[in-house]
Image (cartoon, rainbow, N blue to C red):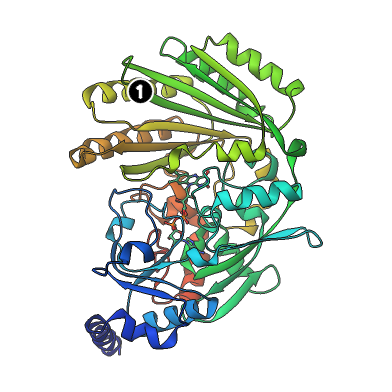
Amino acid sequence: MRFLYQTLALAAAARAASVSLESLFGPYLSPGTEIAELNDTDFDDVVSPRWSEWRPPSWTGAIKPATEKDLQEIVRIAVANNVSFMATNGGHGTSLIYGTVNGLDINLENFNSVDIDLESNTVTVGAGAKLGDITIPLYEAGKAIPRGNSPCVGVIGATIGGGIGYETGLFGLGVDALTSVRLVTATGALVTANTTHNADLLWAIRGAGANFGIITAATFTMSPQPNNGNAVIGSFVYNSTASLGVFEYLAILDDVLPPELGVQLSVSYNRTTNETLLTVDIKHFAGWDTFVDHFESALALNPISANVTNVTLVQLYDGLDGPCQTGAYISGGTIGLGRTDPATLQEVFDDMTAFYRQYPGYIGQTLFQRYANNNTLKTPAHTAVYPWRDTKMFWLHENIYTDPALEKPTNELLVKLRKKLHATSGFPQDQPHIYVNYAFGDEGAEAWWGEENLPRLSFLKRRWDPKGVFGRGTPIPRF
Ligand SMILES: Cc1cc2nc3c(=O)[nH]c(=O)nc-3n(C[C@H](O)[C@H](O)[C@H](O)COP(=O)(O)OP(=O)(O)OC[C@H]3O[C@@H](n4cnc5c(N)ncnc54)[C@H](O)[C@@H]3O)c2cc1C
């Protein structure tokens, strides 16, 4: 029976491969839907943009649905004909596994909507919305949701892996504010998942959301905007003589980081002065009166430069577009830390220095994102598959280069630093905490979603996506 099924599937795939995308899909779609074969001159207009040139998916064509109904038809036809596909929006998904994906790109760009409903205190975001699209509507409404930082990243893409950012300390994880989704499932059906309908599916989408369908709209509960939409931001740059002192100070904050404070430390290299720099970016979602102590502490650690500004939240988020540049090879990886070990962080700083010096073409950086997690811990863990609520700091490594020859040494650097940080993370050595949205791709489902969650997750995968057509970048294993 299984053999018969496989033979039929192969025959369907062969049939589909021999006909054009236009003849396979076109007759069933509205005129606004764009379809492009790989060699068509308009392919680049139809396919989603990609953030990194490192191991991208191999697209066989691209399709940009105009309506939800078109999207349903596309999934139905693709599944029936064994055409593999991946739905994309911001194009930031990157990992070793993404590089093995081969199929049709379904570009969600046309579903770019942001609808605020003050009566229900919710915002509903379409599948094409980027983080930059929600900033002004939320600001003008005096509202906030837990959100990621960079404006080019997809709102739904960032949320469905967990959703972390500078405001995590105040509002928790993106998945905790996500109350309802509409999604197109593997049969092409449009279903709702919320706490009363398909609650199990909502649990799974809150952390493994790319695996169950294509979400066309996601609804979030809003919170009041912090500090009337104003913040104080500071950027302090330290050199190697001060870096250990900064790491030691960070360790003191391990249990007392205030929720209104988001901190990111980045290790980078200045090729003009030939020195490794540690930049501490602080976003303080409150007034100067509570910022002043942090300011004085940062100055006491002897920065080589210090910059502090009062901004609106619109200015704050618009200013986070630095990492949105495209065109380079960028591979990323991560590990969650339950404590700050200053000696290990200093070793990472020193390893990076040696690497920068050995490879002049390397412009990567290593980041430590420290968001208070008291608030996220308050949300009952059983409401979401996202497992790593005890993570205090997210290490995010970004190898950036243009010469493909750097791939091997940069991959080795990433794995070496990850192992080192894991050893002193405070978490069990057989339980690496990997934020799935930052994954390198070699960690596996247990590290992304937690061993205890896998049976329920696999059960839901079998129920909603038995052929495994979704989630090709971070697949749930079948048991
Ligand atoms: C520069 C940069 C900054 C980042 N900043 C943050 C941050 O501050 N906080 C944070 O939490 N993460 C952050 N991330 C990680 C980011 O959340 C993930 O890379 C996320 O998967 C990107 O979503 P996307 O839509 O941009 O990418 P895409 O490549 O378009 O999609 C990524 C994955 O999500 C799936 N997906 C996208 N939309 C849908 C949908 N509507 N329905 C179902 N599946 C969907 C895709 O199929 C794919 O598997 C950042 C990444 C980068 C590169």
Q: Position of residue 256 (x, y in %)?
A: 67, 27
Q: Is residue 233 visible?
A: yes
Whether residue 115 sits left or right of residue 206 in the image: it is: right
Q: Residue at x 38, y 56 (%)?
A: 49
Against 382, residue 231 (above or below) is above
Quadrant location, the C terminus: bottom left
Q: Residue at x 52, y 24 (%)?
A: 280
Q: Residue furthest left?
A: 405
**Residue that badge 1 annotates:** 269
Q: Position of residue 199 (x, y in %)?
A: 64, 69
Q: Position of residue 158 (x, y in %)?
A: 52, 52
Against 291, residue 448 (above or below) is below
Q: Is residue 166 visible?
A: no
Whether residue 222 sits left or right of residue 477 in the image: it is: right
103 or 391, nearer to the observer: 103
Q: Amino acid at mark 1?
A: Tyr
300 or 194, nearer to the observer: 300
Which quadrant of the structure image shows residue 45? Answer: bottom left
Against 29, residue 355 (above or below) is above
Q: Position of residue 264 (x, y in %)?
A: 53, 30
Quadrant location, the N terminus: bottom left
Q: Residue at x 26, y 68 (%)?
A: 38
